């Protein structure tokens, strides 16, 4: 799985994604992450990538030209397939281009699973007041948000999404089971877990977990998941209940 990130702050995403599990996955060749500096593609002799908005309004807008040329450089490299002539062609046969924006669909585990099937993904990170609409129309296939709040740029959302997609790539998590038993799998939150010691601050690990009876443990965990989901995420619980019927 290859991630390509179009950004004005390549060092931010590379640093953020080079440690721990994701860093190991890169070292092991399971995923690759390339940050492309949009500024390297501007034709402006002063290296400018933004300008005022037509019609007035506060702030600066990222211009179409450097974004498009950065995209073309990446798309041209991917599988040597060349560049999509238009957005529709992109949807059908080219790498998906995800524009991270608060105006997009809210990212969730189901979308992470869907994106994890791709060979290449291109993330486009905006800054300032956003990006000229014309280049978005030309190259973007997916508009995705990470929640109803506004950040200063798209780098953190892109990193959030790349982290959650990467851990679904086969081999990235050593324990394959953990990607299927954790929270949001089956619309339920994960059950509570305990490690040594058996008693900590006077609190005892639930007796059933020490019983060695796997069927009973599984039943207890499912009950805990259901109870916890009902209490903490009634919206998810309703979804789960509907699916049971
Ligand atoms: N850029 C700024 N805020 C964002 C958000 N909430 N999600 C995705 N991209 C963003």
Image (tube, grey):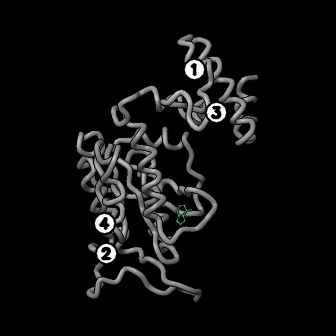
CA separation, marks 3 and 1?
20 Å
Q: Residue furthest front?
A: 202
Of the residues under marks 3 and 1, which one precedes in the sequence?
3
Of the residues under marks 4 and 3, which one precedes in the sequence?
4
The answer to whether 130 appears left or right of 43 in the picture is right
Nearer the observer, disc 3 or disc 1? 1
Circle on res. 188: 3
**Dividing the image into 4 quarters, which one contains the N terminus?**
top left
Residue underneath mark 4: 11
Vertical comparison of 134 with 124: above or below: below
The reply to whether dot 4 and dot 1 touch (C-beta < 8 Å) is no
The answer to whether 229 appears left or right of 98 in the picture is right
> Residue 42, how many percent across, how many down?
30, 77
CA separation, marks 4 and 1?
45 Å
Of the residues under marks 4 and 1, which one precedes in the sequence?
4
CA separation, marks 4 and 3?
36 Å
Residue positioned 27% across, 53% down in the render: 82
Q: Is mark 2 within 8 Å of ligand 1?
A: no
> Residue 172, how many percent across, how many down?
35, 36
CA separation, marks 4 and 2?
13 Å
The reply to whether dot 4 and dot 2 touch (C-beta < 8 Å) is no
Of the residues under marks 4 and 2, which one precedes in the sequence?
4
SS type, badge 3: loop
Total label count? 4
Q: Quadrant of ligand 1?
A: bottom right
Residue underneath mark 2: 39
Nearer the observer, disc 3 or disc 2? 3
CA neighbours of label 2 inside 10 A, class few (<14), some (14 to 19), many (20+): some
> Residue 149, how many percent across, how many down?
61, 64
SS type, badge 1: helix
The reply to whether dot 4 and dot 3 touch (C-beta < 8 Å) is no
């Amino acid at each position: 799985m290859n991630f390509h990130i179009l950004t004005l702050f390549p060092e931010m995403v590379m640093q953020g994604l080079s440690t721990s599990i994701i860093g190991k996955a890169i070292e092991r060749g399971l995923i690759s992450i390339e940050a492309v500096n949009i500024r390297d593609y501007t034709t402006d002799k002063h290296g400018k990538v933004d300008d005022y908005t037509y019609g007035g309004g506060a702030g600066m807008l990222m211009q179409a030209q450097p974004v498009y040329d950065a995209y073309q450089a990446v798309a041209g490299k991917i599988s040597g397939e060349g560049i999509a002539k238009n957005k529709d062609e992109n949807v059908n046969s080219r790498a998906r281009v995800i524009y991270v924006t608060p105006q997009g669909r809210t990212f969730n585990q189901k979308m992470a699973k869907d994106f994890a099937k791709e060979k290449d993904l291109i993330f486009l990170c905006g800054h300032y007041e956003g990006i000229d609409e014309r280049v978005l129309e030309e190259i973007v296939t997916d508009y995705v948000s990470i929640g109803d709040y506004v950040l200063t740029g798209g780098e953190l959302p892109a990193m959030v999404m790349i982290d959650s997609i990467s851990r679904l790539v086969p081999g990235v998590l050593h324990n394959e089971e953990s990607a299927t038993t954790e929270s949001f799998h089956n619309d339920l939150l994960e059950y509570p877990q305990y490690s040594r010691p058996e008693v900590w601050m006077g609190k005892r690990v639930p007796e059933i977990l020490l019983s060695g009876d796997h069927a009973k443990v599984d039943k207890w965990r499912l009950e805990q998941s259901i109870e916890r989901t009902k209490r903490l995420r009634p919206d998810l619980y309703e979804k789960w209940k509907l699916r049971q019927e």
